[in-house]
């Protein structure tokens, strides 16, 4: 029937790699976004090795590997070590913190720009009826749309996460003062990818419900930030923690102290401000069952269990949203 | 095609669209309620009704873009959601949605990539007839040109049922004529069924041979246009004339001593009346104004009673 295929530009490009069917449409719709995303990832991949090389060079030439600002480590007691660590922090820590913050904001950003408009634009402009008016089922369309943002977002954020991890490693916890539990936690591990997927699921779902581009984008951004905040609030309790009978300010840099207070010799927990209003501080503590200051901590070994449980939490939430989206797209209109 | 008639001799031939008890409720209320009718295959059916009558809702339901709240739609004998029927329905929505950033060629490619059957030559000829360049971006086209690209997309997919929601609304008379000609030749060539809505009755009278009249979410008339016309009489008389049975009266107008009544025919000429043949417009308007008469479905427009047949 279509033996008289006219030489349109599209038809004149018979490549095996060229996407077909609905994947052609997905590529046509996402190609500009994917290109911009690729540029951002490539730019990071170009810049990060230089930064890392400079950091490694600084650490090696000043012999400060593993040294913190204040430390009892005999290897770090030499002349000028403290100044060198200080110098490193002035010079390079801002880069580590900036990239960490950018990556922490990445899920909300991808949710806002990639996932928020994904369905809302189709509904707002009515083009969903154009696509579903062809021989395409709702499920096929939904799957292709989700994959068209999830796959590039996942690959790109994995690359950025790897780069950040690699850049952080030489000065990890001690030299840079950027500990595993801070900005690095959400941006230097698999949690980043899981949060990105959750943000995309939020954006797609909000867009399919709100059906207007700008409100959908705004709502997605807000919901993702709130979710990220809530997740960071429950994070310490995702795996069992330990108690150290040490004030939080005296914890080593690779230990994450997230709670503090006073504990009686019998093990009873008392609030941190227990004796704040008391005239005789020591007396007040003695009366409170010889209470001593303690910290709730996660040690460095808790990093992977925490990453695992938090990733799983994000993925379960994302899967629930996608499931809802499938159900809703099949039944509603 | 119609499972109920094993010999294929359903009233009026095989069925394209069969709707029974169809209803659709939105948040603000019922847009369509208890709709039942049938369109035999190969007919050019006009869907007529005032704004808000439920035309777009009905078309979206038949095109499987909406899910019914109640009742059922069968297209070529297949229930809603059946994959076998997906590729056989073409739909051009009222606002002619297209991707504004795509070129015309890319829009046609969308049709080729997303349909199992595709006639590129036909799609391109529809576009070429309107002198729309293939390299133009959709966003730069006029409303009429967008309609043409939408039609090209719909016809290129070689549907057996083509659903057009207000297809001619933004076309000039020449383009209207061209597109109707295209539809007619397509219908003659491939025997497709067309369901098109409009509120310009004159536009439909020339090209359509079948009619569904909707008002306030319900069917008032359905069937072959000739048959519907033959089923009505325009009576002119005065006070002395024998009153027609009230259930036959669609509309009755009194001007001084003269009475004009549009009635359903019952096979005899009532005494004392001058009997005229109403125009389609008169029949439709009388039904829309009165709305109180029972719906009239011609024999071939009645959906098969599945419970009895089974």
Image (cartoon, coloured by chain):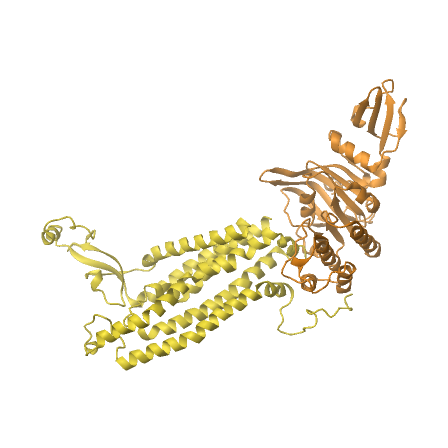
Chain colours: A yellow, B orange
Residue B203 seen from this side: yes
- Closest to the observer: A228 or A40? A40
- Residue at figure coordinates x 42%, y 71% from the top left: A162
Residue A225: give x, y in percent of width and height: 41, 55
- Residue at figure coordinates x 85%, y 30% from the top left: B234
Residue B268 seen from this side: no
Image height of B101 relative to B38, above or below = below
Q: Is residue B154 left or right of residue B177?
A: left
Image height of A257 relative to B245, above or below = below
Image height of B60 relative to B279, above or below = below
Q: Which quarter of the figure has residue A260?
A: bottom left
Residue B79: give x, y in percent of width and height: 69, 49
Residue B134: give x, y in percent of width and height: 71, 64
Q: Is residue A169 left or right of residue B210?
A: left
- Residue at figure coordinates x 63%, y 71% from the top left: A18
> In this view, which residue lies farthest toward the bottom?
A61
Image height of B136 relative to B198, above or below = below
Q: Is residue A108 left or right of residue B283?
A: left
The image quadrant where one finds the N terminus of chain A is bottom right
Q: How many marks?
A: 0
- Closest to the observer: B174 or A10? B174
Q: Which quarter of the figure has residue A161?
A: bottom left
Residue B216: give x, y in percent of width and height: 68, 35
Q: Which quarter of the figure has residue A138?
A: bottom right
Q: Is residue B227 left or right of residue A268?
A: right
- Residue at figure coordinates x 75%, y 49% from the top left: B168
């Amino acid at each position: 029937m279509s033996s008289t295929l006219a030489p349109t530009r599209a038809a004149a490009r018979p490549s095996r790699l060229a996407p077909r069917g609905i994947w052609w449409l997905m590529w046509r719709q996402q190609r500009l976004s994917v290109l911009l995303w690729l540029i951002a990832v490539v730019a990071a991949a170009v810049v990060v090795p230089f930064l890392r090389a400079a950091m490694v060079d600084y650490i090696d030439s000043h012999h400060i590997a593993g040294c913190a600002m204040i430390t009892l480590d005999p290897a770090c007691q030499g002349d000028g070590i403290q100044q060198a660590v200080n110098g490193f922090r002035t010079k390079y820590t801002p880069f580590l913190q900036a990239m960490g913050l950018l990556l922490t904001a990445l899920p909300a950003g991808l949710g806002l720009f990639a996932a928020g408009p994904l369905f809302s634009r189709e509904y707002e402009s009515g083009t969903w009826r154009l696509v579903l008016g062809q021989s395409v089922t709702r499920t096929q369309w939904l799957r292709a749309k989700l994959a068209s943002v999830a796959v590039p977002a996942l690959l790109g954020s994995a690359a950025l996460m790897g780069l950040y991890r690699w850049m952080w490693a030489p000065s990890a916890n001690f030299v840079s003062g950027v500990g595993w539990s801070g900005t690095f936690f959400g941006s230097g591990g698999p949690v980043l990818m899981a949060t990105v997927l959750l943000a995309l699921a939020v954006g797609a779902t909000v867009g399919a419900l709100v059906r207007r581009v700008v409100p959908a984008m705004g709502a997605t951004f807000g919901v993702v930030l709130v979710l990220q905040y809530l997740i960071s609030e429950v994070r310490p309790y995702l795996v069992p923690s330990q108690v150290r009978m040490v004030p939080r300010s005296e914890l080593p840099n690779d230990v994450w102290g997230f709670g503090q207070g006073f504990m009686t010799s019998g093990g009873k927990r008392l609030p941190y401000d227990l004796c704040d209003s008391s005239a005789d501080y020591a007396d007040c503590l003695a009366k409170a069952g010889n209470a001593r200051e303690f910290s709730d901590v996660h040690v460095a070994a808790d990093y992977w269990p925490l990453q695992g449980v938090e990733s799983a939490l994000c993925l379960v939430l994302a899967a629930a949203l996608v499931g809802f989206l499938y159900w809703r797209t099949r039944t509603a209109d | 095609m119609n499972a109920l008639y094993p010999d294929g001799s359903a009233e009026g031939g095989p069925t394209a669209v069969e709707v029974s008890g169809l209803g659709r409720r939105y948040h603000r209320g019922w847009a369509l309620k208890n709709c039942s009718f049938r369109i035999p295959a190969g007919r050019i059916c006009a869907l007529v009704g005032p704004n808000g009558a439920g035309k777009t809702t009905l078309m979206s339901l038949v095109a499987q873009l909406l899910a019914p709240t109640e009742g059922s739609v069968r297209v070529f004998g297949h229930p809603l959601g059946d994959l076998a029927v997906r590729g056989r329905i073409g739909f051009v929505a009222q606002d002619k949605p297209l991707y504004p950033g795509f070129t015309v060629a890319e829009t046609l490619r969308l049709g080729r990539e997303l349909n199992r059957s595709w006639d590129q030559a036909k799609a391109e000829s529809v576009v070429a007839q309107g002198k729309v360049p293939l390299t133009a971006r959709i966003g730069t086209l006029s409303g009429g040109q967008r309609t043409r690209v939408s039609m090209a997309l719909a016809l290129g997919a070689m549907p057996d049922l083509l659903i057009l929601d207000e297809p001619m609304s933004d076309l000039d008379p020449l383009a209207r004529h061209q597109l109707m000609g295209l539809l007619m030749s397509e219908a003659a060539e491939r025997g497709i069924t067309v369901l098109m809505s409009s509120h310009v009755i004159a536009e439909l009278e020339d090209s359509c041979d079948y009619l569904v009249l909707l008002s306030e979410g319900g069917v008032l008339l359905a069937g072959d246009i000739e048959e519907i016309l033959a089923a009505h009489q325009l009576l002119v008389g005065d006070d002395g004339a024998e009153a027609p049975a009230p259930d036959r009266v669609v509309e009755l107008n009194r001007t001084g001593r003269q009475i004009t009544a549009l009635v359903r025919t019952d096979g005899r000429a009532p005494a004392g009346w001058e009997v005229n043949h109403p125009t389609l417009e008169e029949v439709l308007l009388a039904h829309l104004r009165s709305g109180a008469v029972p719906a009239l479905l011609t024999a071939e427009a009645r959906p098969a009673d599945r419970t009895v047949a089974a």
